[in-house]
DNA sequence: TTTGGCTTGTCAAATATTGTCAAATTTACA
DNA sequence: TGTAAATTTGACAATATTTGACAAGCCAAA
């Protein structure tokens, strides 16, 4: 499970909402919503924003998790050089 | 220019090799090799390995730069949350 | 100016990713 | 338990993204 998926599920369950309901709001199949929560599919940025809206969550928080998932899925393929690569990528990144 | 492209060009020029020669070794068009050095196209992992071989460079060094470029192109789209996302991605990463 | 090396724009082909549908599985609970 | 609703899964169709070739252009050196 991804950072984002976990968080979405958490928020959704806390509010007793069904996958079906979130899916309807996003106008996608329930199956897709399930996959998103389970980390099987990556939502688009706009979908993340809409999810945040629907779940009354902080948009930036979800976008942060969404990006973190993207980074992780990029580096997981290359564990051998991941650490060093992250260090380099960090350099050109201002706080 | 990308980290990887810059380094490849450096290595190639130090050895007075032409784009055409590297391209021939990789069996691709010269134009593509030019784009790779300039960061217009991302080479495949196998291409990076072959480039390292042809230029007598350290394979891991180039793969590191290659991955760093990938990470950077992922985060550059989301500067607002990039820093935090990097922090999260770093956590599940052993040295 | 011509030549050789490099670069760039465009587009078709290849790859990768998303989203749907149908079917299977799990869960809640009468 | 039985069963209806909710969720998950697998297969594949629909989309989106990326790559690489080709042709044309640019620039520096002779």
Image (cartoon, coloured by chain):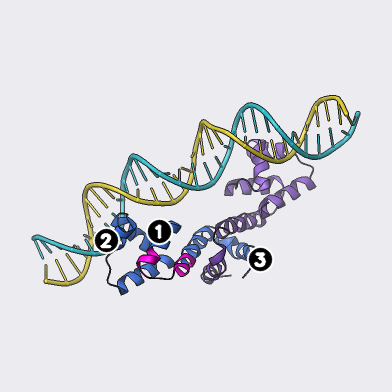
Chain colours: A purple, B blue, C cyan, D yellow
* Residue located beneath label 2 in the image: B20
**Quadrant of the image containing the C terminus of chain B:** bottom right
Quarter of the image with the N terminus of chain B is bottom left
Q: Mostly what secondary structure, the magenta segment?
A: helix
Tell me the mark number nearer the camera, choosing from 3 and 1. Answer: 1
Q: Nearer the viewer, residue B22 or C3?
A: B22
Residue A62 colored in magenta in the image: no
Q: Which residue: 76% across, 41% down? A: A17
Percent coordinates x, y for residue D23 in the rendering:
22, 47
Position of B41 compared to A20: left or right? left
Between the residue at mark 2 and the residue at mark 3, the CA separation in whole angstroms equals 43 Å
Whole-percent x and y of residue A2? Answer: 66, 53
Circles 2 and 3: CB distance less than 8 Å? Answer: no
**Disc 2 or 3, which lies upstream in sequence?**
2
Q: Secondary structure at mark 2?
A: helix
Q: Chain of mark 1?
A: B
Which quadrant holds residue C27?
Answer: top right
Label 1 sits on residue = B47
Say if labels 2 and 3 share a chain. Answer: yes
Crowdedness near tag 2: few (<14), some (14–19) or many (≥20) residues, C-alpha within 10 Å: some
Q: Position of residue A30 (x, y in %)?
A: 67, 36
The boundaries of the magenta stretch are: B51-64
Disc 3/disc 1 C-alpha distance (Å): 30 Å
Classify mark 1: residues with Cα within 10 Å, few (<14), some (14-19) or many (20+).
some
Determine if the magenta segment contains residue B60.
yes
Residue A58 against residue B5 in the figure, above or below: above
Residue denoted by label 3: B91
Chain to which mark 3 belongs: B
């Amino acid at each position: 499970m991804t950072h984002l998926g976990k968080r979405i599920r958490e928020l959704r369950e806390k509010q007793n909402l069904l996958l079906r309901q979130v899916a309807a709001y996003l106008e996608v199949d329930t199956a897709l919503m399930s996959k998103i929560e389970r980390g099987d599919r990556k939502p688009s940025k706009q979908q993340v924003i809409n999810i945040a809206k629907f779940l009354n969550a902080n948009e930036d928080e979800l976008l942060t998790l969404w990006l973190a998932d993207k980074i992780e899925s990029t580096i997981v393929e290359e564990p051998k050089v991941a650490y060093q690569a992250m260090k380099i990528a960090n350099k050109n990144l201002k706080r």
